[in-house]
Amino acid sequence: MSSRQSGVWTGERGLPGRCSVQVIAQWTGAHADALRHSMRMSNESFAGYLGVAPRTVANWRKFPEVVPQPDKQAILDTALNKASDAEKARFAAHVSEMSSRETDEAPVPVAVDAMTQSLAAMVPNPDERARVHGVLHMPSRLDAATVTNLGQVLYGQRHAEDTIGPSMLIDPMKAQLETLITALRETSGPNKAGLLHLVTDWTTFVGWLHTALKEYPEADKAFATAEEMADELEDGILASTATSFRGYLALLQGRYRAAIRATAAALGTPGAHPTQIAYDTLQFAQSYAALGDFRETEKLLHRASDIVTGAGEPPRSVYWYTEPFLRMNIGLAQHAIGRYRDAADSITSGIAELPADQQNSDWVNDYRQVLGQSAEQPE
């Protein structure tokens, strides 16, 4: 898989999964309608599912500030508890988006509230949620457990994006990043490096969301910022990923020489993970193929195949860089040089071995499109 986020990082420079149980202390009409929308039901079907009158559901949609009666609150609690992981992920994103739109006059409280809503979905322990919420309001209290819990929020929302796509996540993730940047600026002590690592990873994810939405200038600014932070941390994994994404952006825009330069920089980053090296070798191959240098592409494909075999499990920050995903990228390069049958085999087998939530994600459609083109070519 391959932000512009206002705020200040360390006071010096501008910055651009699975869900558990979402907790709603008091349902409103807006919450209820968000649940209906997340379950992809009409007013009538949702009313039938809950056992309430269709007029009740219509009123929730018409009057978002209304507070349902206690019996309806309990019914909604039960419906949410029974929802699938995908439905809970969509609901959590809806609620976060609602929170981030509540006011334009108090960005930090809104961002904290958006983070609180995400915590409710990703961190089920109420004591841990309270701990994180306290730290967000008083960053001097930052501890290792809070950094871990915030990392769980990021990991969960990365997985949610596989299911619900980027458009519903971009605004909540930017608001939450702003909260973390504020906390980073105001905290000190032994856990600051852990928070900086999280902010770096979070910034890269926001950059990916901009990329998926074709907001390329914002994406490049986010990746450039993530590069700087990763260099400060001396973290080769995060640095090579951010640099690689800049190459991916250039490839998407048809700037193939720029893609080669950025990808070469990612490959030359000390500490890059083997799965990242495998992916970047394939990105290198695709870029050379686009320039018509098929001989170099074949050499890179051969090299990448050897790396993929022994790359192992990817780090959490690029959890999708698995062997099936890398095989799909082998297929892209094979297609680009006219090896259509090989490309179809590589992409087909790769998609088939992806986790279920990734198989139906938006980004897999790009591979399916190439697969269809390969299948249409003569033997």
Image (cartoon, grey):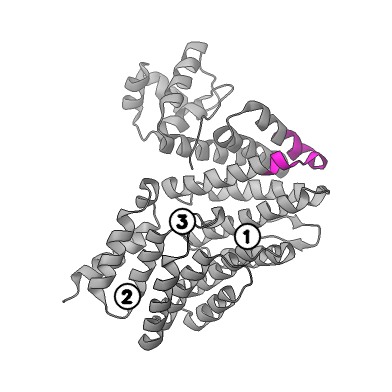
Q: Which residues are magenta?
A: 133-147
One can see residue 104 in this view? no
Report x, y in % for residue 166: 48, 52
**Which tag, 1 or 2, sits closer to the chain's start?**
1
Q: Assess whether residue 27 is covered by the magenta stretch.
A: no
- Disc 1 crowd rating (10 Å Cα; few below 14, some 14-19, many 20+) is many
- The image shows residue 42 at horizontal and vertical percentages of 34, 31
Residue type highlighted by circle 3: Trp
Q: CA distance from mark 3 to mark 2?
A: 21 Å
**Residue 52 numbered mark, or none:** none
Circle 2 packing at 10 Å, graded few (<14), some (14-19), many (20+), is many
Q: Which residue is mark 3?
A: 320
Q: Which residue is mark 1?
A: 4
Q: Position of residue 261 (x, y in %)?
A: 55, 81
Q: Secondary structure at mark 1?
A: loop
Disc 3 on helix, strand or loop? loop
Horizontal side, residue 63 vs residue 202: left or right? left
Q: Nearer the viewer, residue 367 or 282?
A: 282
Disc 3 to disc 1, C-alpha distance: 24 Å
User: Which is more N-terminal, label 1 or label 3?
Assistant: 1
- Residue at x-position 70% and y-position 48%: 180
Query: Chief secondary structure of the magenta span?
Result: helix
Q: Residue furthest front?
A: 310
Please tell me whether residue 308 is drawn above or below residue 108 in the rendered image: below
Location of mark 2 (residue): 334
Q: CA distance from mark 1 to mark 2?
A: 34 Å
Q: Amino acid at mark 1?
A: Arg
178 relative to 128, above or below: below
The answer to if 136 sits in the magenta stretch is: yes
